[in-house]
Amino acid sequence: MKDRIRLLMESENMTPSQFADYLGINRAVISHILNGRNNPSLEVVSKILSEMNYVNPEWLINGNGNMYKDGSEKKKIQNERTLFPENEIKPDQSPAKSEYSTEKTVREINNIVEPIINETNSSLTKHERKITQIIIYFDDNTFETFFPHNK
């Protein structure tokens, strides 16, 4: 059956990765099948037959008959999927601008930044830090400690 799956992929011009992604199964599953490590599970066969309902089940399972069902046309699978195929912008169209989304984003940023600035300012004014000691290390492995004069 692995050879028929390979033939099907070749007929559809799909790589093993594309085929696995199209069926919604792990790429390693297809890799193991094609390398002969594992036989196709019922789940894999079911996925192929449900996603590619034009494939002849008798051919896929037993190798009898034609690859495609009689009277059915081979479905062209789009190998490269776009993120937003329905909303493609054509060269002669300009994208619609949304003032609301820009305004909302700026407002959200301002609402986040202002509390942070206020917290920083208030924390600096509440607690004044003072130096308690200074230690200087010398290259001869000695050190001196200095204490500030408290007034």
Image: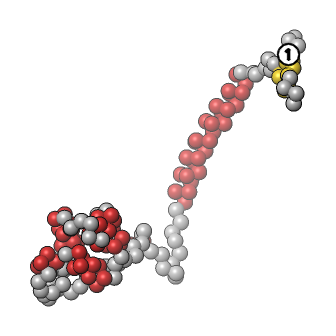
Residue closer to the observer: 32 or 72: 32
User: Which residue is tagged 1?
Assistant: 147
The kind of secondary structure element at disc 1 is: loop
Q: Quadrant of residue 145?
A: top right
Residue closer to the observer: 19 or 111: 19
Q: Position of residue 47 (x, y in %)?
A: 21, 68
Residue at point 72%, 27% (across, down): 124
Q: Is residue 46 above or below residue 129?
A: below
Q: Is residue 95 above or below residue 124?
A: below
Q: Residues within 10 Å of mark 1 (few under 14, many from 20)?
A: few
Residue closer to the observer: 15 or 98: 15
Residue closest to the far bottom? 71
Res. 23 in view: no
Q: Position of residue 24 (x, y in %)?
A: 29, 65
Q: Is residue 100 above or below residue 76?
A: above
- Left or right placement of residue 131 versus residue 72 in this view: right
Residue at point 83%, 22% (across, down): 135
Res. 34 in view: yes
Image quarter (top left, top right, bottom left or bottom right) of the C terminus: top right
Q: Position of residue 118 (x, y in %)?
A: 65, 33
Q: Quadrant of residue 66?
A: bottom left
Residue at point 30%, 71% (across, down): 35
Colour option used: secondary structure
- Left or right placement of residue 127 versus residue 100 in this view: right
Residue at point 27%, 66% (across, down): 37
- Left or right placement of residue 126 versus residue 26 in this view: right
Amino acid type assigned to the residue bearing label 1 in the image = Phe
